[in-house]
Image (spheres, helix red, strand yellow):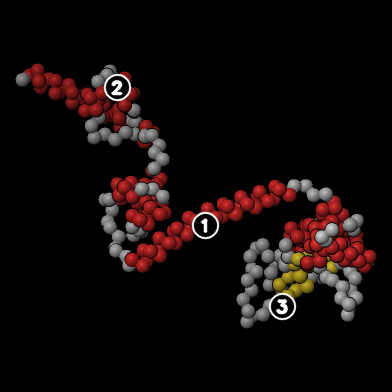
């Protein structure tokens, strides 16, 4: 009896040391080496009920999913809805959240609507990736453009967007207005190909009076590579309180009007080139 008692006391003393080391943050291996315990069964008994320190825990890729699943369950989502949100199996979800209270049963039509919304959101991400891939491939396909290609593209752009001469009102001039910075950037490059220097250009901003007028003037001046002080007086669009203006984001900078001094001859060249493009594209010869 005394021998058994001594063994029990020795084990308890050893366990007390093991627990103390564990709570100091030591790993199983460190405790084993410190106590000279090579038997895993004995080590397990010594550390029974003592959780491992955080630094010894291996990262689990599903920890974040488990945490998110519990958050969604507490928000009242069903297993199906959590599965749509996280993309994991319902068996895993059940293990993660089974200790949480069940949500109130929702109307079937509401469940169907939520499920459809989640599917739409997931499909939207895929479609957006496909759109981006198509656009990037098309961009790379164009590559560097020759001056002739820039000229022909610029003629087409001007004939679609620029001011044109009318039989009842002779206006042979190059006058172009647009709100897209890339369109303006290309238009200025086209004028470079035509040999039009910046000294022959006149700029004016057209913008809503309630917008950031000074910011818009600075933006367009930087894009054109000129000083904002050389701009003509900005044209302000009056605010109509009966209508709601949609272009209110920070990206709204109005339109830039670009006028070429002495551009009559250039205009005739552009008009002739446009008809040449039409004849060349539609010719059956």
Task: State the CA–CA distance, disc 1 to disc 3.
Answer: 39 Å
Residue displayed at 37% across by 54% down: 82
Q: Which mark is residue 32?
A: 2
Residue occupied by mark 1: 124
Tell me if 166 is positioned left or right of 100 in this view: right
Tell me if 236 is positioned left or right of 280 in this view: left
For the N terminus, give its image quadrant: top left
First along the sequence among labels 1 and 2: 2
Task: State the CA–CA distance, disc 3 to disc 2.
Answer: 82 Å
Q: Give SS at disc 3.
A: loop
Residue occupied by mark 3: 238
Task: State the CA–CA distance, disc 1 to disc 2.
Answer: 54 Å
Q: Give SS at disc 1.
A: helix
Tell me if 100 is positioned left or right of 146 in this view: left
Residue 277 sits in quarter: bottom right
Residue 207 sits in quarter: bottom right
Tell me if 239 is positioned left or right of 196 in this view: left
Q: Give SS at disc 2.
A: helix
For the question of whether residue 214 can be seen, the reply is no
């Amino acid at each position: 009896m005394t021998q058994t008692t001594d063994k029990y006391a020795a084990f308890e003393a050893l366990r007390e040391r093991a627990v103390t080391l564990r709570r100091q943050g030591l790993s199983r291996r460190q405790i084993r080496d410190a106590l000279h315990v090579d038997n895993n069964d004995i080590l397990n008994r010594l550390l029974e009920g003592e959780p491992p320190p955080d630094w010894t825990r291996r990262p689990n890729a599903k920890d974040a999913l488990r945490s998110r699943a519990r958050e969604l369950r507490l928000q009242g989502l069903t297993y199906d809805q959590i599965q749509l949100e996280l993309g994991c199996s319902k068996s895993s979800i059940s293990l993660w959240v089974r200790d949480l209270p069940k949500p109130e049963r929702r109307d079937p039509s509401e469940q169907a609507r939520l499920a459809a919304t989640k599917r739409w959101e997931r499909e939207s991400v895929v479609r957006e990736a496909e759109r981006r891939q198509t656009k990037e491939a098309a961009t790379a396909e164009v590559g560097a453009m020759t001056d002739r290609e820039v000229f022909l593209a610029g003629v087409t752009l001007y004939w679609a967007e620029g001011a044109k001469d009318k039989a009842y009102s002779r206006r042979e001039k190059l006058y172009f207005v647009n709100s897209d910075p890339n369109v303006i950037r290309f238009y200025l490059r086209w004028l470079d190909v035509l040999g039009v220097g910046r000294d022959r250009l006149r700029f004016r901003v057209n913008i809503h009076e309630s917008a950031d007028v000074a910011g818009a003037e600075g933006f367009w001046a930087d894009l054109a590579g000129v000083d904002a002080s050389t701009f003509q007086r900005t044209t302000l669009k009056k605010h109509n309180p009966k209508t709601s203006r949609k272009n209110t984001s920070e990206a709204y900078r109005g339109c830039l009007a670009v006028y070429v001094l002495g551009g009559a001859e250039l205009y005739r060249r552009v008009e002739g080139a446009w008809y040449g493009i039409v004849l060349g594209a539609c010719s059956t010869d």
